Amino acid sequence: MSEPTSATDIAAGYAFAGPALDLGALLWDGKCLPEAPVRIPLPMLNRHGLVAGATGTGKTKTLQLIAEQLSAQGVPVFLADVKGDLSGVSAPGAANDRVRGRAAEVGQKWTATGFPAEFYALGGLGHGIPLRATITSFGPVLLAKVLQLNHTQEQSLGLIFHYADQKGLELLDLKDLRSVVAFLTSDEGKAELKGIGGLSTATAGVILRSLTAFEAQGMASFFGEPEFDTAEFLRTASDGRGVVSVLELPAVQEKPQLFSTFLMWLLADLFHDLPEIGDADRPRLVFFFDEAHLLFNDASKAFLDSITQTVRLIRSKGVGVFFVTQTPKDVPGDVLAQLGNRVQHALRAFTPDDQKALKATVKTFPNSSYDLEELLTGLGTGEAVVTVLSERGAPTPVAATRLRAPESLMGPVDGPALDRAVRESPLYERYAQAVDRESAFEKLAARPAGRGTGEAKKAKESREAGEAREAREVREAKGSRSREPEEDRSVVEQVVGSGMFKSLARSVGTQIGREITRSLFGTARRRR
């Protein structure tokens, strides 16, 4: 595509025939052109995006603007509200001279509008329906990120999960995992430790200390039951608008690795539950990661590889992911390459590092007739440089844009109103009260003392008995099959029809079932 040389050329690149979100109006030669709207095609919102810019340049309002229009077109939205000012999406905005002036400049018919919203809080810390995950569902890779373990310790944590799964020790909350690790480092459990290989007593001790410290900081409430069903994020309201799910995070700002990693768990859980739909006329859900740099800080290679793969593959399941951060360099290159829709707010260049970040940002844009280094340092609040994917999947021309004003409240709703909305939610009764059923902690506490010397022999006998039982089930399944020739049946049909598979499906809590469904992050797929 040749480089656009006029406002008309750029405007033509945004003249989409199908449904689209209106971002604002083109800025050209110092003027705002309301007759030249800048838009994003609705079907391209699952191709992921980036909203970037320095502090105070309007990133949060851009996020709110996109979320409103997605909801209005029937698309559910998930927002991570780190600063606590996105709850206003549920209430009509307040008209004032600034809002009316901006609407007139960009040709917007502004109407104060609130959007259907649900409010959540990690573990119930803050205003919102509690979001919890079980330890086994969260998995060793994500948990290692939260606990700031190194690569060796992360692998060792994986072995501990494997051991717990094999022994039927359900890991539902932190005390379950802590009790398993404590048992493996005890005199009684040392034989078990040797049996799983590759796990030293010293490493297990480091993990145990990390878990104890983490729990002492009040983080235990994030893990347990009832585990949140991420399908709740896919709902629409009775009027057909998409529900905006707002995760309130101010109460856990001092734990950035926890909330960023928990967000990744939510995304990974969706990835494993949703069927493939390919290209669709609209996304199933658009997911916004605010303060995205926190997700990637000090991340292991395995963690980064898993993020990249999840972002790459979840598009075909109808989920769009937007990362919101200060500069594109906050996002690893392999992830950045997946983000086809870009809204870049102003950057500041006060230091040599700022200059490097500015030059790196300019290189990520297609060629344009703008001097992007000069433009990006001169943009005002609520202005951005935009390029998105057209209906054909090709990048649109770079467009300096004055953005529209959100129609919902640009600020938080008051605490009592927020609490009232949470209590009146149909989800409140389902998730508000924590449940603590029998799991690894209780099972290990009930073990008779003095079993250490014969533990290895008993484990071997138990394992051999289990293998014999599975072999019997396979033989019985073969005997009960129809006379359909084996070679005419697909591998999937053979497996699904087997007695062993049915046994596994019935045994929801067993580790064999959990290991079969381990995800990219080592998380376990939920059965719904």
Image (cartoon, helix red, strand yellow):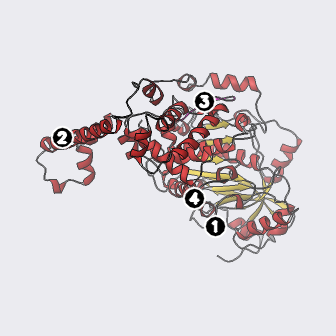
- Among numbered discs 3 and 2, the one appearing first in the sequence: 3
Name the dominant secondary structure of the magenta segment: loop
- Among numbered discs 4 and 1, the one appearing first in the sequence: 4
The answer, for residue 521, to whether it is visible in the render is no
- Among numbered discs 3 and 4, the one appearing first in the sequence: 3
The magenta stretch is 123-134
Give coordinates of residue 37: x percent, y percent: 73, 58
Residue flagged by tag 2: what amino acid is it?
A: Arg
SS for dot 4: helix
Q: Which residue is mark 1?
A: 395
Q: Which mark is residue 221?
A: 3
Say which of marks 3 and 1 sits in front.
3
Residue appearing at x 77%, y 72% in the figure: 6
Binning the other alpha carbons within 10 Å of mark 1 as few (below 14), some (14 to 19) or many (20 upward) gives some
Q: Which mark is residue 119?
A: none
Residue 24 falls left or right of residue 508: right
- Among numbered discs 3 and 1, the one appearing first in the sequence: 3
Q: Which mark is residue 472?
A: 2
Say which of marks 4 and 1 sits in front.
4
